[in-house]
Amino acid sequence: MKYNDFKFNEFEADLRWSELPKQYVIYMQSIVHWWPNALGWDRITDLIQQKQGKDISIDLPDNKTIKIQFKARRSDYGDICIEYRHDYFSGYEKPGWIELPSSADYLLYCVPENVYRIDYKQLHNKWLLYKNSWISNYDLTPARNDGYNTRNVGIKFDVLEKAGIEIEKLHIPIILPTKSEKEAHPTIHWPDYPADNHPLWPIELYQSWIDKNLGSKEQSARYKVSVAWYQDGK
């Protein structure tokens, strides 16, 4: 089989990067945008629920709940990377996330500057219908891990939409402070700070910076609410 030309980052490195505090602020901005009436959210830490495709549970009015699964990618290739199998060097095979049952309502697929909201049930159902064709046409070079290879396909978003999958895109610009801004407020954990600890970002110290860099009132409001949610740990 001829694979599409693609280079993968290590799985463990991608996983650590996707769980950085700065990524969760991006996830929260997406939630504030698509569910502005949300009362709050809970990060799912139970391993069994995570394996069922639930990363965050969003509380809505009238006791309604939305279950979200997140996938984050450090580079934007204009497609979605779908993991369908793990090939262990011992000969054992394990299904990828797209092959497993999931209780998620939506997949939020995060790449630099854009987040895609994908109807998860539609994605899963269409995968079962078209997976042989998609694997044949969009298979990626196996990603080598410790003891196994991960098999993935890279499918363009327009291909998914033509298959009947609902996709919405949200632009979230990358915000990088200038050298002078960093020097002016050296104690601030700026949004690109790759820390594993809980970030404490004093909004009042760089409110003007937020307003200047985010551009629109909607972006600014969404950012402030998402950071407040994250700090409160709702």
Image: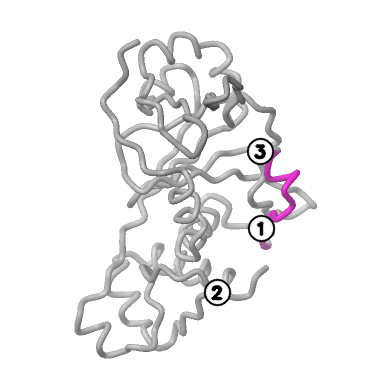
Counting residues from the start of the chain, the first of labels 2 and 3 encountered is 3
Say whether marks 3 and 1 touch (CB < 8 Å): no
Please name the amino acid that badge 2 sits on. Answer: His
Please name the amino acid that badge 3 sits on. Answer: Ala
Disc number for residue 43 = 1
**Residue at 31% over, 60% down:** 174
Disc number for residue 198 = 2
Give above or below for 173 relative to 65. below
Counting residues from the start of the chain, the first of labels 3 and 1 encountered is 1
Closest to the observer: 189 or 28? 189
Counting from the top left corner in percent of width and height, residue 9 is at 37, 43
Residue lying at the far front of the rendered structure: 90
- As drawn, is 76 to the left or to the right of 179? right
Discs 2/1, front: 2
Q: Is residue 74 magenta?
A: no
Which residue matches tag 3?
104
- Which of the 4 image quarters holds residue 178? bottom left
Counting from the top left corner in percent of width and height, residue 109 is at 46, 42
Discs 2/3, front: 2
Say whether marks 2 and 1 touch (CB < 8 Å): no
At mark 2, the secondary structure is: loop
Q: Is residue 47 magenta?
A: yes
Mark 2 vs mark 3, CA separation in Å: 26 Å
Q: Point out the stretch of residues depicted in magenta.
A: 40-51
Give above or below for 226 relative to 58. below
Closest to the observer: 121 or 22? 22
Closest to the observer: 158 or 130? 130
Please name the amino acid that badge 1 sits on. Answer: Arg
